[in-house]
Image (tube, coloured by chain):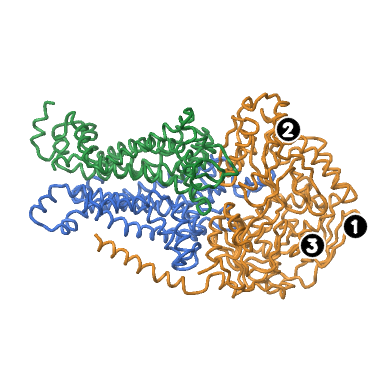
Chain colours: A green, B blue, C orange
Amino acid sequence: MSDAASIDSMPVVPEKVEKGTSLTRDAWLRLQKNKLAMICLWVFAAIAALCFIGPYFKYIPGLREVLPDPNATHLSERSQLPNATYLLGSDHLGRDIFSRVVHGGRVSLMVGLLATLVSITIGVVYGAISGYASGRTDAVMMRIVDILYSMPFMIMVIILTTMFGNQLWLLFVAIGAVEWVTMARIVRGQIMSLKKQEFVEAAVSLGYSDARIIFRHLIPNTIGPVIVYTTLTVPSVMLLEAVLSYLGLGVQPPDSSWGTLIKEGADRMQSDPALLVFPAIFFSATLFCLNFLGDGLRDAFDPKSSKD
Amino acid sequence: MFRFLLNRLLQSIVALIAIISITFFLARAAPGGPFLEEKAIPPHIVKQMEAYYGLDKPLPVQWLTYMGNFIQGDLGPSFGNKGYTVNEVIAQGLPVSLTIGLGGLLIALGIGVPIGIIAAARQNQFADYSLMSLAMMGICLPTFVTGPLLSIYLGIKFGWFNATGWNEPSDWFLPSLTLGVFYAAYIARLSRGGILDILRQDYVRTARAKGVPEWRIMVRHTLRGGLLPVVIYLGPAISGLISGSFIVENIFELPGLGTHFIVATTNRDYTLILGTVAVYAVLILTMNFLVDIAQVYLNPRLRSSTAPEKA
Amino acid sequence: MKRVLSTFLRLLLTVTLPCALLACGGPSPVEEATANNVLLLGNGAEPKALDPHLVSSVGDSNILLSLFEGLCAFHPSDDNMSIPGAAESWESNEDYTVWTFHLRKNGRWSNGDPVTAHDFVYAYERILTPAMGSPYSSMLYFLKNGAKFNQEEIDSFDEVGVKALDDYTLECTLEQPTAFFPELTKHTTYYPVHRATIEKFGSMTDQFTKWQRPGNHVSNGAFKLKSWWINHSVVVEPNPYYWDKDTVTLKEIHFIPMTEFTEERAFRAEQLHYTYAMPSNLIPWYGEHYPDLVRREPYYGSYFYRYNTTKPPLDNLKLRQALAYAIDRNAIIDNVTLGNQTPAGGFTPPTPGGYQPPTPYSFDPEKARQLLQEAGYADGGEVPEFEILMNTHESHRAIAEAIQDMWRKHLGLTNVSIANQEWKVFQSTIIEMKYDVGRAGWIGDYMDPTTFLDMWRTDDSNNNTGWSNPDYDRYLKEAALEPTPEARLAKLHAAEEILMAELPVLPIYWYTRNYLIHPDVQNWNPLLLDHHNYKFIHLKAAPPHPFFKR
């Protein structure tokens, strides 16, 4: 890059220090030094692997018994605590809770991660453009956010499901539509304060295009709040999925997701504690891992931390 | 500044009209009407009822009529609560939702901000991990789990509070706590992150090098900028606390606006849906407006240049 | 760090302790209420109106039952019996087509005005006037020309079969012989309204007026409206002018709208005397530990699935029957609903007064498989996809999941799915017949099989299955003209046999009401229709119950 030298000489252009191919590798090296983050990464990988591979156990003779059909009821063996047959107990219809948690995890993780990704992408780009543009563009974009904020979400979902039926893409649209707006506001706030900093003014004076400034200079500097808010979005997306499934969008009975299992468990917590406790443990473990992993990633990717 | 305020007010009014209009047509597009009951009402009766409430007129005419009344502050009759106007229903419900929402906000800030500050000051130490884990519990346990648990333990087992209802002065506490612990986790995360960002800034390093004590750095140099993400989040949080309280209102059986909104939606009580949405919209628009101002105040860099730029 | 935590804890305690002490010291809300003769009732949902001509739901009519009194009134322990209400006595002609009611001279509205026969005529005119748009006006189609007037086929109310012979004598002329007409006069739709009050706040047919407000509301029952806070409570207090006011011992009744989960917690915290319902999963626990607090009483209702008979594969009668034989209803009741419901082999619940419905459908997997073969499917996997549709509710969901799995186990059906829908979406899907199998429940309005059987007539607005049978329609018509009650019930039985043979519905169970009741409540008796005459209920502080330890 021809202009690299001139930028590097300026002390307040942090992201330039990391420029080049080494950014992700540096981050990965730094992440590996963070023990907690690494433990969380492996625990999360284990949970995810179990949820995505588990459903295929039924084709393997030895493992079939560990994860029986999650929807097969055994009414006479309902509401049991963990035992040899039901590793994590059985639910109110005598279904294997472990199996339901594993099968439900696939849906929840997929929805949680993909829908979050979708909403974060929209939110970050939208917020960054709005914050950078300011003036009339910003005003219009932010009023659109305000309008979306105020829309009665339940009615929107009801209409969408009656128009299009229960479809996966609709689930992502519905979740994306609500979750990105807060992200957009947070990123916009960050960008507005960042763009007054010297490195941006330097980039402007070098004649870089707006797009380049937004995507190369500003957005990487918002990574802290973005990662923090992302780890907060995942759980709300997973729980939102449960609400949507009750409105007829997403997982439908007898299939499960962590959100619907926790909802079922909450309604029966006094008679079937296992139905609440075990899905909640898986759910919480995943969120804890994502949370500390997020903190680790944030530290690892932080442009400023390289100076430490 | 005055021009900025006026400009912003006009924008908000346009947004409000857009929100009401879109909701108006959305509500009508949803299947089932207010007079669809489990035991079917004969069609000729439904026609009479629709005629009585003016629902038989063409939709654009209804919309114009509604907007005309809306501007005059008349939100119309409620279909689901016969004999009450939407204005009256909202007047009954809003104070309840405001009380538990603001109570929840106080609890969320009271728990979230200190945890965030301590965690940031002790980054990657035991205190950081344990406090942040504690805060995460608030998110991992959704309100439909914490609510009944708090009601059962603090309400029934210990008998400290009423398990449900809205009769005694202390009845705000359990619902607010349920709402608060959920938002506390968000606030703890955001404030920790924000403070960490500032702690890495050069001027903080300079202060440290000069030997300024840690607590002073925290109070004088970091809090104002470090809490910026929290402040930005307060807009969504407050509107969320007040409008999203229906699960908590349902768990504790509170006569708040959230319950009205959900019941209105299931009843297709069009006027009440619009009324509650309008209240929420005004709330959200105001909150975001205040947050924008606070943002400028907290960020000295913006302060000097924002006003002319916005106008 | 430690210091911060302890400071924080101390802060929390200083905030919570005072409130805690306040709440802890005094008597519980129920103890206090009992001492003051205030009855705290859980009542399901918020009432939509307190106007007897506008309500249609069970919760609404519970409140109206305390405020108003029909010509006849509910007996405290036998709902097949009518006791004198606004009328002191009544008689009919030989064939039960003309009924004469003699009103009591000391009947008074809650503002002191006398209750006269004209009030009833006015009320019946109001509910039947088309412009009123009363949702339940069809209950008055028993009156001669009631239907015609309501459907604008005749213009003059004078032709409708109700007349005030003098101030205190009311004569009702009916379309058909109706031996149970006194039963009907207990229903909310037959309650009188106070003309002067209605017309003070609007015209006769105004739906939306302020007359229902506390302070404006005038009623003729044992109680009158004291306050109404939406989604919080409706409070009634004794009507000082009520003719039988000495029987009334309660000072107030609070009707509190609550969901079953909240109700149970409120009951445990001694904040309610009575819960309208309870979470099914807790019924066995209460039954085992505190059987004296939980009541399980038969309720005049039927839980069933509708079949869409116009659409393959459920247009196939043999398949519908196979599905009905493949459900183990006892297993569902013992393990899923948990509330002592009665397995329904037929549709109409057994009715006091001599109606035993045909109940051909019991659990018989052998027969089910045989019928599946006859339906043309060698194996359950061949049955094309269809869907069980339900409105979103935890208990409906569990039942549907159990049934789906029974069909899979006993018939090998692998293509059955379940779908949730939001309440109104669900209702429109059913009405528009865009479903395959749809959940349904029906609660009887009065004690007669016709309240269940009428809905399956051709083109009845509650049919929604596409099923129709001219013989069925004819039997119902003929039953109405039978001279004796026995012959009439036999005709109805024959009609229901047709219904069961052609099976547009899948009967599952007959309702049982499960609820919690505080030992302080006296004279709360099991009633099949669950219509309690509140003037007979009283409160007496019972010795402390171990369940409510504080």
Q: Quadrant of the N terminus of chain C?
A: bottom left
Which of the pair B63/B251 is nearer the observer?
Answer: B251
Q: Secondary structure at mark 1?
A: loop
Residue C93 numbered mark, or none: 1
Sequence-wise, which precedes: disc 2 or disc 1?
Answer: 1
Which of the pair A68/C310 is nearer the observer?
Answer: A68
- How far is mark 3 from mark 2, CA to CA? 45 Å
**A25 relative to A237, above or below:** above
**Is label 1 or label 3 in front?**
3
Check disc 1 and give the amino acid type.
Asn
Q: Position of residue C520 (x, y in %)?
A: 63, 70
Sequence-wise, which precedes: disc 1 or disc 3?
Answer: 3
- How far is mark 2 from mark 1, CA to CA? 50 Å
At label 1, counting other C-alpha atoms closer than 10 Å, the crowd grade (few under 14, some 14-19, many 20 or more) is few
**Is label 3 or label 2 in front?**
2
At label 2, counting other C-alpha atoms closer than 10 Å, the crowd grade (few under 14, some 14-19, many 20 or more) is some
Residue at image mark 2:
C367
| Residue A227 falls in image quadrant | top left
Marked residue chain, label 3: C
Is the Cβ of the residue at disc 2 closer than 8 Å to that at disc 1?
Answer: no
| Residue C475 falls in image quadrant | top right
Q: Secondary structure at mark 3?
A: strand
Q: Position of residue B69 (x, y in %)?
A: 50, 51
